[in-house]
Image (cartoon, grey):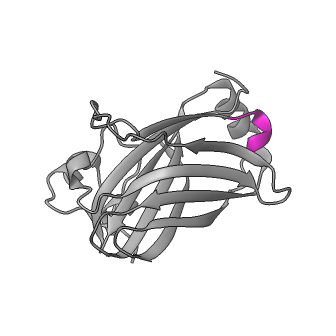
């Protein structure tokens, strides 16, 4: 038996959102499914790198600037990323995504990410990665391998012609409870 389809509106009524809940979503969310305050484990992504697994070429890398002494004004800052790639990115079959993150002073068990990619509300691919256990007050690095689906020439052409209509939701869970939700959109037209 598969996972039942659900909607963003239905999930907003839940007190706890689970991995099965988000796997039932049929389209990109319009809003975040949890607030920044729900990140009680103080998970903070500090570096992110994407590389082509075949050649090792780094395609994208970003490091979060230090925030010492600065007060974060926008609670949603850092929850959205806009990616700009060339059309050649759509030809890749495998990329490695290295993330570096810190956690607060409580240990984290069963840290998991589910990332769902859509083009115009059509699910392209759902990725499911386990981070596992994270020690308290630690800095962690791991690389997840993304296996991309083969897309038709027509879909790729549409994705190139319509920048930022390819979008993703990244849901982060601790012990099967949603604690973070980030969003991204993508351009494959080679520029802004």
Q: Is residue 178 placed above or below 71 in the rendered structure?
A: below
Residues 182 and 15: in front is: 182
Residues 168 and 84: in front is: 84
View extreme (top): residue: 192
8 in magenta: no
Question: In percent of the image, x 27 and y 56: which residue is there?
Answer: 39
Residue 49 on image: x %, y %: 63, 50
Residues 38 and 87: in front is: 38
Residue 105 on image: x %, y %: 28, 68
The reply, left or right, for residue 18 in relation to residue 67 is left
Residue 101 on image: x %, y %: 46, 58
Question: In percent of the image, x 36 and y 42: which residue is there?
Answer: 29
Question: In percent of the image, x 73 and y 32: which residue is there?
Answer: 157
Q: Is residue 67 placed above or below 17 in the rendered structure?
A: above
The reply, left or right, for residue 121 in relation to residue 97 is left
88 in magenta: yes
The quarter in which the C terminus is drawn is top right
- When asked about the image quadrant of residue 4, the answer is bottom left
The reply, left or right, for residue 76 in relation to residue 157 is left
Using the rendered image of the protein, determine whether residue 152 is visible from the camera's viewpoint.
no
Residue 122 on image: x %, y %: 51, 45
The quarter in which the N terminus is drawn is bottom left
Tell me which segment is drawn in magenta: 85-89
The reply, left or right, for residue 112 in relation to residue 98 is left
């Amino acid at each position: 038996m598969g996972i039942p389809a659900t909607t963003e509106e239905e999930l907003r009524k839940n007190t706890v959102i689970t991995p099965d809940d988000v796997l039932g979503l049929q389209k990109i969310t319009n809003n975040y499914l949890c607030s920044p305050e729900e990140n009680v484990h103080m998970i903070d992504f500090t570096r992110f790198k994407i590389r082509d697994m075949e050649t090792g070429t780094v395609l994208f890398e970003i490091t979060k600037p230090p925030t010492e002494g600065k007060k974060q004004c926008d609670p949603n800052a850092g929850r959205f990323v806009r990616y700009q790639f060339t059309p050649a990115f759509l030809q890749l079959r495998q990329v490695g995504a290295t993330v570096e993150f810190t956690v607060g002073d409580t240990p984290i068990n069963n840290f998991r990410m589910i990332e769902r990619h859509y083009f115009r509300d059509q699910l392209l691919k759902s990725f499911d990665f386990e981070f596992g256990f994270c020690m308290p007050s630690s800095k962690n690095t791991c690389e997840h391998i993304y296996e991309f689906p083969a897309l038709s020439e027509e879909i790729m052409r549409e994705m190139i012609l319509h920048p930022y209509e390819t979008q993703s939701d990244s849901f982060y869970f601790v012990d099967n409870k949603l604690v973070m939700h980030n969003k991204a959109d993508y351009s494959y037209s080679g520029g802004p």
